[in-house]
Amino acid sequence: MRRRRSFLLPGGEKVAEGRMRGPALCPTARAREPLLAEFIRFDRITKFYGPLCVVENLDLGIGKGEFVSLLGPSGSGKTTLLMMLAGFEQPTSGTILVDGQAVNDVPTHKRDMGVVFQSYALFPHMTVGENIAFPLEMRGLGKAEIADRVTRALDMVQLSAMRERRPAQLSGGQQQRVALARALVFEPRVVLMDEPLGALDKQLREQMQLDIRDLHRRLGLTIVFVTHDQSEALTMSDRVAVFNKGKIEQIGTPRQVYDEPATRFVAEFIGETNLIEGVVARISGGEAAVRLASGAEIVSAVSGGVAEGATVYLSVRPERIELAEARNAAHNCLETEVTDSVYQGDHLRVELAAGSHPLIAKLGRRSREFEPGTKVFAAFSAGDCRVIAPPDGQRQAAAS
Amino acid sequence: MSARASRTGRSLFLLAPLLLFLAGFFVWPLFSMMSQAVSDTAVLRLLPQSAEVLAGWDRKSPPTPEMQTALIADLKAVEDTQALGDMVRRLNSARSGFRTLMSKTTSALSDEADPPADLVSIDKRWERPEFWLAIADALSPLTDRNLLAAVDLGRNADGEIEHLPADQSVNRVILVRTFWISALVTFACIAIGYPYAIIAASLSGWKRDVMLAAVLLPLWTSLLVRTAAWFILLQEQGLINDVLQMLGLTSGPVQLIFNRTGVVIAMTHVLLPFMVLPIYSVLITIPKNLMPAAASLGAHPLRAFLRVLLPLSLRGVAAGSLLVFISAIGYYITPALIGGPGDQMISSIIAFYAIGSANWGMAGALGVVLLAATLVLYSVYARLSADEPGRR
Ligand SMILES: Nc1ncnc2c1ncn2[C@@H]1O[C@H](COP(=O)(O)OP(=O)(O)OP(=O)(O)O)[C@@H](O)[C@H]1O
Ligand SMILES: [Mg+2]
């Protein structure tokens, strides 16, 4: 396991590096479609609990072998969606299709989906081995085959020594892995995980993240993973669906939702960002010129849905901002004054004021210190900046 | 050290009211009841001199003159006719014929004009060792006679344990009946109470409260009132028969009262809370997501129930069954009011001995049998629940 992790880590860093540089101009619309053959489709799903609308008219397609994370704040309806897919809850309206077949009326035990619950839901009166054998027994497999597959599943999660123990005699992380083995041992069509790592400490969580990701790759599983931890969603998934109040705000690859947030909510929910309000002055060739209140004009990447004259937000990630003494013609430049600067180990966090507007910049570890009061230019390229469309109502007004 | 001792002292002091209460209202009555069952001083009290002399007797040879003189002296000294009656009854139950022999003897002894020389001259039967043997045995202050009689056993002339004749063997039948009725009630309580508890535990909010209140309400009503209510409901012209006939399920009234059916119905109702509450309290500790988890792993709801919910809730069912069964074997009012003569349970017999015939020995002995049965059941339960798997 250690070897595998050390093998994975450099790759992970490379991804992050690439993300920093890329102009990332591909339109988010493309990401709405799954990259692979579609396997699961939520078709206009609405769910009410009494008068409370928990999921609203939701469309979502998930490809075969894809790892999709549902990311969103507490109460945004992620669990509810997962429970509807597993068959524990019925949608108020809409259809859920798996492999082209509507499954609304299929009872849970015939849906063939492995579910990993946040609290593991291991059977306390059975040993680890019996827990993992349970789904195989339910499928009427022979004794020898069950024993064999349980052994392999235990090997996979490296718990062979714990076979005869009861769940209460295991640590949280071990229980977690038993739950995982139990959900995978019967080779389900889909694996659903509801914040499976929520109860683990940071170190164990990171290890399990890599383990699950590795299993996903090796076994070609289709995984729907619910989390409210954005870094978890970004590290693990092929695509991330960002939930807010029962709706999907944006769905796309981790890079897309991070670099090209479609809405203000996504920009603020995923990572830290600087939001600057302005009015679109011109749009030409995928770039927009936005005039700020201070009169400065900023050139930014833009995708559809924004018209000239609309009030928009600009989102600039703190790590994309560079501080320079002199104006740089190739970049957007804002005149700022340093108000604070904090060394945080892996980066230097500098708080700035552009006029009255606060900005945050995260600089590389090797950057020089900035004294409060220093006048600097905050520079960033058009590609590192996104225009965020105004909310629905305004957008329509602007389009008409 | 001393701090610790003073802490122990303080806690003992705080516990004192409880301990005193337990001693006064539980341990002492229990102990006195049990000692009633084995103590037997009806004869020893009246025949102190005979007791001394008979201690040296070889239990086989014909009575010596000393034995006869001692007995005559004892009998002459008796003034309490009630105690004498008790003694005679006691001796007669060990050896039939004692009643006539004794009345003949006492009347002869009270004849001041012509005092008899010895007992044999009053009646030839005083020559036979069996009668003396009965007295010698009855002199012992401890006896197993009541305990044996409680399970229809007795000692024959040779002191061997044997079955009592059929016309005296009623206790064992009643004991078996008591256990049988209790078992029926326990099964009925499981059949109704288990699904009820499952439904109550799966609900939330006011619905759960209503279900629990419905079960608790009978507990807050007097047992007598509940039994009387069933007495009215179960009558031939009662509500239940009316409804059955109205629905066309039966053509005439069904006999529901003064028989076994009525007893089981009424006792089940009265004891249901003791089944529902333990099961419910176990069910609510079972994580809510186990059944969905089983379903997602491919278990049909019935198999999920059998493999997951049932084994996890069995502890509650066992505790509830124990409570119901133990309460049921002690039931008195309900079978007395609703049952027929063939449905009386052991407590009625105990009450009969205690109140009706003032035979505290037999009442105590039957009580001891009941207590022993309860303790055996409890130890079985304790053994089973000690190695219960899945306890966290
Ligand atoms: N059984 C239920 N009855 C009524 N309301 C419910 C029920 N289950 C969930 N809700 C409500 O639905 C909303 C969405 O719940 P859901 O569990 O899907 O949120 P979530 O996104 O999973 O949040 P979290 O991250 O906290 O798990 C919440 O407001 C919750 O209160
Ligand atoms: Mg949730």
Image (cartoon, coloured by chain):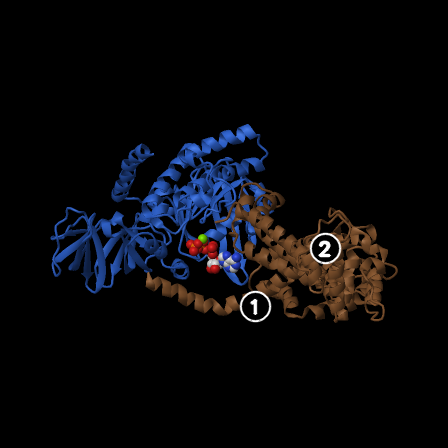
Chain colours: A blue, B brown
Residue pushed farthest right?
A: B252
Q: Residue at x 35, y 39 (%)?
A: A210
Between discs 1 and 2, the one toward the N terminus: 1
Please state which of residues B354 and A19 is positioned toward the viewer in this rendering.
Answer: B354
Q: Amino acid at mark 1?
A: Gly
Of helix, strand and loop, which one carries label 2?
helix
Q: How far apart are labels 1 and 2 at the CA level? A: 36 Å
Q: Amino acid at mark 2?
A: Ala
Query: Which quarter of the image is occupied by the N terminus of chain B?
Result: bottom left
Please state which of residues B299 and A346 is positioned toward the viewer in this rendering.
Answer: B299
Q: Position of residue B136 (x, y in %)?
A: 72, 55
Q: Position of residue A314 (x, y in %)?
A: 29, 56
The quadrant holding residue B71 is: bottom right
Label 1 lies in what chain? B
Dot 2 beta carbon under 8 Å from ligand 1: no
Q: Residue at x 13, y 60 (%)?
A: A372
Label 2 CA crowd tier, 10 Å (few <14, some 14–19, many 20+)? some
Q: Position of residue B336 (x, y in %)?
A: 76, 64
Label 2 lies in what chain? B
Q: Is residue A180 left or right of residue A318?
A: right
Looking at the image, residue A329 lies above or below residue B226:
above
Please state which of residues A226 and A200 is positioned toward the viewer in this rendering.
Answer: A200
Q: Is residue B303 left or right of residue A308?
A: right
Disc 2: which residue: B136
Disc 1: which residue: B24
- Foreground tag (1 vs 2): 2
Please state which of residues A345 and B283 is positioned toward the viewer in this rendering.
Answer: B283
Are the residues under badges 1 and 2 in a single subunit? Answer: yes
Looking at the image, residue B165 lies above or below residue A64:
below
Q: Is residue B370 visible?
A: yes
